[in-house]
Amino acid sequence: QVQLVESGGGLVQAGGSLRLSCAASGRTFSSYGMGWFRQAPGKEREFVAAIIWSGRSTLYEDSVKGRFTISRDNAKNTVFLQMNGLKPEDTAVYYCAARKTNIISTMRSAYDYWGQGTQVTVSS
């Protein structure tokens, strides 16, 4: 069983930055693939970024490429999402997710565990 707790959300002006963190419990964290998703009001939850256990392979949704960076610190059981150049359309609740299979996936159904989410609001 893995429990995920996100933090780092908040209100920021367009062009600003935020760093989200996701702290995971469980001794097998380092073997899990991790991902970030987001859900804006009235919209489906969508993929943002994912990373394999070693951190050597990552994948990003097209609209965040070059602005967001996913990383992980297995010694601290934490995955991060550095968000730069934020835009109003990035406003959403951001969720951390973990999957037992160490393969990157953009599909929500591929992930086994989810955090409670953290709100990110970008003002124009």
Image (cartoon, rainbow, N blue to C red):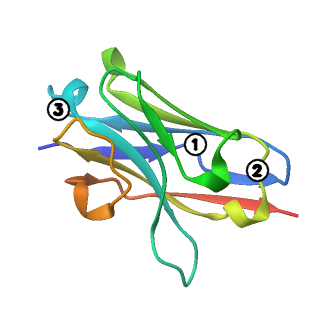
Considering every residue shown, the one lying at the far left of the view is 1
Residue beneath the point at 61% across and 53% down: 62
Q: Are marks 3 and 1 in contact (CB under 8 Å)?
A: no
Considering every residue shown, the one lying at the far bottom of the view is 42
Camera-side residue: 96 or 11?
96
Given the image, on which type of amino acid does mark 1 rest?
A: Gly
Return the mark for residue 86: 2
Given the image, on which type of amino acid does mark 2 rest?
A: Leu
Callout 1: helix, strand or loop?
loop
Return the mark for residue 26: 3
Residue beneath the point at 34% across and 53% down: 115
Task: Compare marks 1 and 2 and give the one earlier in the sequence.
Answer: 1
Which residue is label 1 attached to?
8
Given the image, on which type of amino acid does mark 3 rest?
A: Gly
The image position of residue 78, as x and y in percent, is 38, 29
In three-dimensional space, the C-alpha distance between marks 3 and 1, rounded to whole angstroms, equals 21 Å
Q: Are marks 1 and 2 in contact (CB under 8 Å)?
A: no
